[in-house]
Image (cartoon, helix red, strand yellow):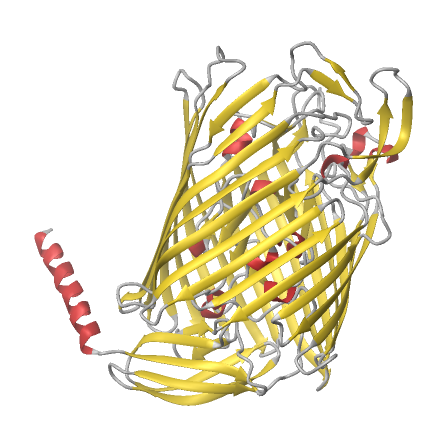
Amino acid sequence: MQIKQFLLVAALCAISFFAKAQSPGNLSGILKSKSGEPLPALTVKLLNTSFLTVSDNSGVFLIKNLTPGRYTLLVSGIGFKAAQKPVTINAGKETAVSFVMEEEGITMDAVTVTGRSVVQEANRQAFNITAVDAKQLYNSTLDLAGALDRVAGIRVRESGGVGSNFNLSLNGFSGSHIRYFIDGIPMDGFGSSFQINNIPINAAERLEVYKGVVPIWLGSDALGGAINIITGNNHRNYIDVSYSYGSFNTHRSVLNAAVTSKKGLTFQLSAFQNYSDNNYRVKVDAADINTGAYAPGVFLPRFHDTYHNETLIGSVGFIKKKFADKLLIGMTVGSNYKEIQTGARMVSVFGAWHRRGNILMPTFKYKKDNLVKGLDLTINANYNLGTETNIDTMSVRYDWFGNSKPNGTSGERSRSLYRYKNNNGLATAMLNYRIGERQSIALSDVFNTFDRKGADRVNPATVDQPRKTQKNVLGLGYTYNAEDQWSASVFGKYITQRNVLSSAGAKASTNKLGYGIAATYFLSPVLQLKASYELTNRMPEAIEIFGDVENQEGNPNLQPERSKNVNLGLSYNFAVSPDDKFIVNANGIYRHSDNFIYNRLNNNQSRLVADNREGVRTLGGDAEIRYSHKRWFSAGATFTYQYLQNMQQYEPGYLGESPLYLDQMPNIPYMFGNADASVSLPNIGGKGNNLNIGYNLLYVHQFYLYWPSRGGDKLDIPQQLSHDLNVVYSLRNGRYNVGLESRNITNTLLYDNFSLQKPGRGFYLNLRYFFNK
C-alpha cells in the first residue's frame, strides 16, 4: 500500500512538473462581420485537438493553456462561411488574431436550430440534441416555456395564464420525467418563484433540448430527456433592459447587466418581474350559488387569478484567472403571489384562496480547465432558504359569477394558514479528463436534499409530519471521438435515495443502476445518423411523494421508474441553389417503462395525484424541416406523433384482465405540430434599422381526458389551432427595439392539462434597449 501511495504521489509531482515545464501560451481573438459588427456564438476550434470555445456577445474568444507550437484555427457558425487561419503559440505569451467573417445566407426564424453547442462539438454530437437560439427571441414577450413549445417533440402544457402550473411533454415523457438545468446546474428545489414559464427568454442565450439519453455531465436521473438553459458568457460590460405590456393587464420587465474589470473582477446582475390579472374569459357550465340557476356554456371572466413574481440574481467573483476560469459567489432572491382560481378541474372554483412564497438562495460556482493537464473541474452548490405560505382562511364558497356564501368553518378547500420551508440543497461536482485528442473520461456526482418543515397557524394542534428525502446520482462516462467521422459515449449511473415518511421515523431507501450508449456517424459532411440506448431509472420527486400543498396530493407509496429507451435520428442539410437551403431533422423513439409515474385525478377530481402504472410502452417520432432564402425569408414546420399505451394487464378492482389493458394513456397529447414563417427587411428607415415580420401556428390534435375504454367523444379535449403574429422594428443595429405581438388572433378556445382553459386572444407591446461596450 505504501509503495502504491508513493508511486501515486510521484506521478502527481511528475505531472505537475511537466505541466509547468511546458510554459503554455494562450490564444485570443475577435470575430466581426464585414460591416464591423461583433459576432457572438460562433464556434472556434483548433483542428486536430480537443480545444474549442465560442465567441461571446462582443465577438471575443479565448483559449488558454496551449502547448507551444503551430495550429490551424477554424471558425464556423450557421449564417457564415467557415474560415481557417494558421496560428503559432509561443511559450508564456498570448497570441491575438482577428477574423472578418463572410456571410453565407443561412438564417432561421424566431426559433433557430443553431450549430452544435460547445459540449456537443467536443463529443461530436453523440447525443440527440436540438439547440434553440434564444437571442433571436429577445424582442418578444415569450418566456422560456413559450420558446420550447415551438421545438419538434415538445408540448408545453399550462393550467392557465401567467404563473400557472406547467407540464412539459418531450417525446412521450412529461412532468418530472424531464429534468431542467441552468448552465448545467439542476433546477431541483428552486421554488415556485423560479420556473421556466416565468423566466423571460432574455435570461438565456440558448436552450439545449436533449431527447432521450442525457449526457453524464448533466448528472441527473432524467427518464426521457433534459432542458439545459445556457445563460451565456456574460463576462463583459453591457446592459440589456426590456419592458412589455399587454392584454389581461400583463406586465413583464427584464434587466441583465454585467461589469468586468481588466483584472477579471466581475459583477453580474439579472432581474425580472411578471404581473398579470389573468382575467381572460372562459367557457364554463356555471350555476348561481344562491338561486341555483344553471347556465351551461356561458363565457365568464376569471376573477381570482392574479399572479406576480419578482426575482433578482446577483453574483460577484473572478473570471479568466490562474486559480479559476470562473469563481462566482451569488445570491438569488425573489417573491411570488398567486391567487388560485380553480382546482384540478374547472368545476371547482375559488375566490379567496391564495399562495405567497419567496426564494433566498446563496450560490457558489467554480470552474477550472486544465487543473492539471487534461483535467477539468466544475463545482456548483446552492441552498434554498425560501418559504411558502398556503392561505385558505375564508370560510366561504364561490361560484363562477363571483357570488359567495358562508361555508361553515372549513375554508374554501381546507381551512389553513400553513407556512413552510422546503429546505432544498444541491451540490454537484464534475471531473473530465482528456486522454489524448480522441478520448475522455468523465465522473460526476449530484447530491440533492429536501426537508419540508412548517406549521399551520389556524390549526396549531396539527402535528407536521417529517417530509425528508435525500438523493445522490453518481455517473461515470467514456467518450471516443474520431474527428469528422464518428463518436460514441458509454456511461453508467448509480442512484440512491432515502426518504423519511413519518414521525415514527419510517424510512425507505432505494438504489438503482443504469447504463447506456450514444453514438453518431457522419455519412457525409451534411448527412448525419444518430442512435442511442439506455436503461435508465428515476426516483420519485419530493412533490410527488409529499404533494405541493395546493392541487397535488402526495403519494408516499410511489415506486421508482425504470425505462428502456431507444432513439434513432437523422439530420440532413442541403441546398437547391446558393440562395435556397434546407435543414431536415427526423427522430424515432421507443420506450418501455416499468412503474411509469403519471398524474391522475383523485377520487373526487379535485386534485392531482401521482401514481404508478406497471408498464407503459411508447412509440413515436418527430420531424422538422426548415427553408431559408438568402437572409430575408425563412419558414419551417415541425410534426410530432407519440402513442403511449398502457401495458398493465391486471390491477386492483377488476376480475381477470383489466379493460384498460392496451388503452392509450389519457390526458397526453399524441399528435401536434408547429409552422412558422418570417420576413426580415434590412435598412428600413435608415442603415442598421431592420424590420422583421413573423407568423407562428400551433396545432394540437384532439385527445382523451379519461381512459378511452371508459369514455366517449364527450370526454375528448378538442382539436386546437392557434395563430400568432409579430412585428419587430430594430434601430441602430439592435440597440433600440420595438415589438408588437398578437397571440391566438382567432380567439380559439385552447385547453390543456385536464381540459383547463388557456388565455384567448391577446395583444402585447415590447420595448427593449441593449448596449454593449
Between residues 458 and 13, which one lies in front from this camera angle? 458
Percent x, y for residue 333? 47, 44
Determine whether, in the image, residue 390 is placed left or right of residue 444.
right
Between residues 83 and 491, which one lies in front from this camera angle? 83
Q: Is residue 253 visible?
A: yes
Percent x, y for residue 217? 43, 56
Between residues 467 and 736, which one lies in front from this camera angle? 736
Q: Is residue 510 visible?
A: no
Residue drawn where x is 56% and y is 74% of the image:
522
Total marks in image: 0
Residue 685: name its quadrant: bottom right
Percent x, y for residue 559? 52, 31
Percent x, y for residue 483? 46, 76
Residue drawn where x is 69% and y is 44% of the image:
157
In the image, residue 600 sits, relative to residue 52, either above or below, namely above
In the image, residue 221 sits, relative to residue 259, either above or below, namely above
In the image, residue 40 sits, relative to residue 473, either above or below, namely below
Residue 500: name its quadrant: top left
Between residues 58 and 159, which one lies in front from this camera angle? 58
